[in-house]
Image (cartoon, grey):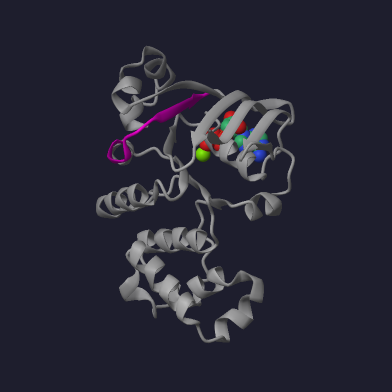
Amino acid sequence: MALLELRNVEVSFSGFRAIAGLNLSINQGELRCLVGPNGAGKTTALDVICGKAKVARGEVRYRDRDIGGFEEYRIARLGVGRKFQVPSVFKELTVRENLRVALCDPHGVFANLFRRDSGETAERLEMLAKLVGLADELDRPACWLSHGQTQWLEIALLLAQNADLILMDEPTAGMTGAETHRTAELFNQLKGKHTLVVVEHDMSFVREIGGVISVMHQGRMLAEGTISEIEQNAEVKRAYLGSGGISNA
Ligand SMILES: Nc1ncnc2c1ncn2[C@@H]1O[C@H](COP(=O)(O)OP(=O)(O)O)[C@@H](O)[C@H]1O
Ligand SMILES: [Mg+2]
């Protein structure tokens, strides 16, 4: 059964239909890349899933319940985490402190900062740091991290908050080739345990991820398939005309 299903979803901005009858189905544990030319509606699609954009028509079904129209905080509480292009880490805090805050949210930010970690918290904290490649940076202030490391810390924060469905908008933008490769490895490690929907332009990254790719165009799903299937799809080629083709988007 699908964890997430968009059924004929429409989103309008002052009469302009940015999403115009979008269908999308994602299974539990899947890692799905969402691609499409500029203005296709990819960011708006993530916005409507996390409740940032309002559904005008159709259904956003998560765990078989229509969450379209729910407030953002309610959707977040159901386990939907969104990573934005601008990271929301606390720059003045260390990596450890950022993780500590995310791990123990119910106690409040300040209580978490000054509390001693229980064995379990310390273990989870270190496991998360290791997973995202920040085990050696735990006591560094977040403002000292590289761009790529900051993105990884933010992903770790989503994991710490028990996000089950993670939505990411161009997570590798601005990363070096090595960082992009490392991010693909990380996502491949996360799939199965978490469900990830990743909007991405970088086709070398999409290739490393593999699996099913969804191509959006003009607010709709244009094609779905493996990378070679979508690269050979005539409609996809047409949609990317003028932007130098799918591999140069
Ligand atoms: N807040 C907004 N107000 C008006 N138009 C918007 C807004 N957000 C997005 N759009 C329009 O909706 C379309 C889809 O945008 P977006 O989802 O950002 O596309 P993508 O992420 O695929 O580049 C674009 O034509 C964009 O200009
Ligand atoms: Mg976008």
Residue sticking out furthest to the top = 234
Q: Residue at x 68, y 38 (%)?
A: 65
**As drawn, is 129 to the left or to the right of 197?**
left
Q: Residue at x 40, y 60 (%)?
A: 152
**As drawn, is 140 to the left or to the right of 176?**
right
**As drawn, is 5 to the left or to the right of 243?**
right
**As drawn, is 125 to the left or to the right of 178?**
right
- Residue 150 appears anywhere in the view: yes
Q: Residue at x 52, y 51 (%)?
A: 164
Tell me residue 173's x, y (percent): 40, 48
Tell me the quadrant of the picture where the C terminus can be found: top left
- The answer to whether residue 220 is magenta is no
Q: Residue at x 73, y 48 (%)?
A: 71
Q: Give the quarter of the image for residue 61.
A: top right
Q: Is residue 242 above or below residue 190?
A: above
- Residue 39 appears anywhere in the view: no
- The answer to whether residue 209 is magenta is yes
Front residue (pair 26, 98):
26
Q: Is residue 161 above or below residue 195?
A: below
The magenta stretch spans which residues? Answer: 207-217
Tell me residue 172's x, y (percent): 38, 49
Tell me residue 27's x, y (percent): 49, 36
